Image: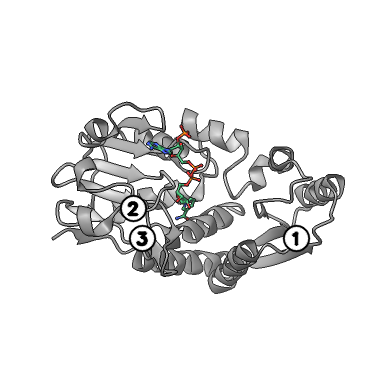
Amino acid sequence: MALLIDGKKISAEIKDELKEIVAKKKAEGKEITLAVIQVGNDKASSVYVGNKKKACEYIGVNSLAYELPEETTEEELLSIVKELNERSDVHGILVQLPLPKHICEDKVLLAINPDKDVDGFHPVSVGRLWIGEEGYESCTPAGVIQLLKRSGIEIAGKECVVIGRSNIVGKPMAAMLLRENGTVTVCHSRTKNLAEVTKRADILVVAIGKPKFITAEYVKEGAVVIDVGIHRNEDNKLCGDVDFDSVEPIASAITPVPGGVGPMTIAMLMCNVVKSNA
Ligand code: NAP
């Protein structure tokens, strides 16, 4: 039977560790403030923003909420970002995506001061990751690294295969596994003979965005399988990109959905927030 990697437990451990660090900083007179900007009232975004605010409250960080109307112009949003960049009492800035269509996301993300870029999406943060400099890391792949490390899974020297090359998951995931001395292969929609490549993996990270796509035929006996995907199936139940029932019997360790990678994203965001007032 595969080891079930418990993201709920690991993320709770991380948040408790952060709570202690924040309490110590407070005792030294150091407060941390995260500004969270949401434009419009997309339901899913409101849930994510609510969860981020709750996590801030739990670890003892101040959150400054900007709930802007859908018709906010790009210029107005950029001017708020500029003001927050300049405020010394604001340490992290987070703009909830997606933004309404009339606002260019890239332009807004680029406007955030890289030293306050707690989502790790700014090109400077991405560059720092690839050249091995200290900086903010994209939260979901950083969460995967923590799941592996805290489950005692060695990455160095392992064949690591990542399925997916998005800017928020696949690419930073590859950079982080490489930094941990894994031998990394990245697959995408143009990869030929996908199963042949994925069967080489000691550690397989799946971020393909297709429900239950990865079955046992894609997985080597004894591999560690990390499922980044999140979907709602016909019965309104959550499932991942991996067909858990098919893969679990041959994996040595696997993340469930829900309760695997999902809870780690906010925990890693909180790590970045705490780092923002180091
Ligand atoms: P995405 O932007 O849609 O990227 C999917 C990637 O999979 C692309 O690189 C695509 O290749 C590749 N792909 C698609 N079909 C393929 C195939 N048949 N064979 C091989 N590769 C294929 O998705 P994403 O934003 O990275 O997210 C991936 C999954 O993770 C989604 O289910 C998403 O909901 C979930 N997610 C979860 C969290 C979390 O907190 N747990 C955070 C972010 C995302 P091309 O580049 O060639 O198109």
Q: What residue appears at the point 65 percent right and 51 percent down from the top-left corner?
A: 98
Q: What residue appears at the point 36 percent right and 64 percent down from the top-left corner?
A: 10
Of 185 and 114, the residue lying toward us: 185
Q: Amino acid at mark 2?
A: Lys
User: At numbered mark 1, what does the secondary structure look like: helix, strand or loop?
Assistant: loop
Q: Nearer the viewer, mark 2 or mark 3?
A: 2
Q: Amino acid at mark 3?
A: Gly
User: At numbered mark 2, what does the secondary structure look like: helix, strand or loop?
Assistant: loop
| Residue 51 appears in the picture as rendered | yes
Q: Position of residue 127 (x, y in %)?
A: 55, 31
Q: Is residue 227 left or right of residue 79?
A: left
User: At numbered mark 3, what does the secondary structure look like: helix, strand or loop?
Assistant: loop
**Which residue is denoted by mark 1 in the rendering?**
40
Q: How far, Cα to Cα, is label 2 from label 3?
A: 15 Å
Q: Is residue 182 left or right of residue 106?
A: left
Pointer 3 with pointer 1, Cβ within 8 A: no
Label disc, if present, on residue 260 of the rendered structure: 3
Question: What is the total number of numbered labels drawn onto the structure image?
Answer: 3
Q: Nearer the viewer, mark 1 or mark 2?
A: 2
Q: Is residue 202 left or right of residue 122?
A: left
For the N terminus, the quadrant is: bottom left
Q: How far, Cα to Cα, is label 3 from label 1?
A: 29 Å
Q: Position of residue 151 (x, y in %)?
A: 26, 56
